[in-house]
Image (spheres, coloured by chain):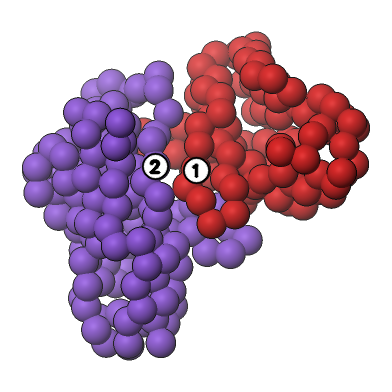
Chain colours: A purple, B red
Amino acid sequence: NAGVTQTPKFQVLKTGQSMTLQCAQDMNHNSMYWYRQDPGMGLRLIYYSASEGTTDKGEVPNGYNVSRLNKREFSLRLESAAPSQTSVYFCASSAATWTRRSNQPQHFGDGTRLSIL
Amino acid sequence: ELKVEQNPLFLSMQEGKNYTIYCNYSTTSDRLYWYRQDPGKSLESLFVLLSNGAVKQEGRLMASLDTKARLSTLHITAAVHDLSATYFCAVDGWDSNYQLIWGAGTKLIIKP
């Protein structure tokens, strides 16, 4: 079972370049999330989507945009990359909805390791 | 604002010893999750604790939740090297739109 698939796995960008991180899940989950993980810190939520067509800001949304393309796919875009955005980015999904919390955990992809020079 | 604190943040221990990782959180919640992360890898769900007094066990790991004390513990019994990893707790707050708030993680090194 694929679960949550992220592409690419690694990327190096120059300051000011743009790129899109892709995420797809095959578990028919309603909610999807983008996190960043910096050394010595827990996960910080960038954006989340509780259903197809809806997105909302998390703790650290500045410098990012997202698109919930359909129920399976949730992309994260850096319009003008900055060195402060060097991090590991994780996509996750869960069965939670706006009106019902899930008794199941969030499922994570393998991450994208992004370096911005 | 929901805050989650784990301690210790770093733990080095010998095989065969017992130890406990603590996860304190600052506001009402009845759902807490424990995850494991190996270096350079993704996060793997270990336990989902859904009510006060919940206890889950898997092998040498046991997790519990005390919602009144706003505390969860992850207990390691007779540690083995394979349990070396970073362990995270995450809390689902009632007022957080179902977002998870994460602790900073406990890096556990178990020496043979």
Camera-nearest residue between B93 and B109: B109
| Identity of the residue drawn at 58% across and 39% down | B36
Chain holding disc 2: A
Kind of residue at badge 2: Phe
Q: Is residue B64 left or right of residue B91?
A: right
CB-based contact (under 8 Å), mark 2 and mark 1 = yes
Please say whether residue A75 is visible from this viewpoint.
Answer: yes
Residue found at x 89% / y 31%: B16
Q: In this view, does A25 lie to the left or right of A36?
A: left
Q: Residues within 10 Å of mark 2 (few under 14, many from 20)?
A: many
Look at the image and tell me in which quarter the C terminus of chain B lies: top right
Q: Which residue, given by chain and number where applicable, does mark 1 sit on?
A: B43
Whether A113 is drawn above or below A82: the answer is: above
Label 1: few (<14), some (14–19) or many (≥20) C-alpha neighbours in 10 Å:
many
Position of residue A108 measured from the top left corner of the image (x, y, whole percent):
39, 42
- For mark 2, give the secondary structure: strand
- Residue A115 - label: none
Which residue position holds label 2?
A108
**Marks 2/1 same chain:** no
Q: Position of residue A117 (x, y in %)?
A: 41, 87
Residue drawn 25% across the image and 62% down it: A21
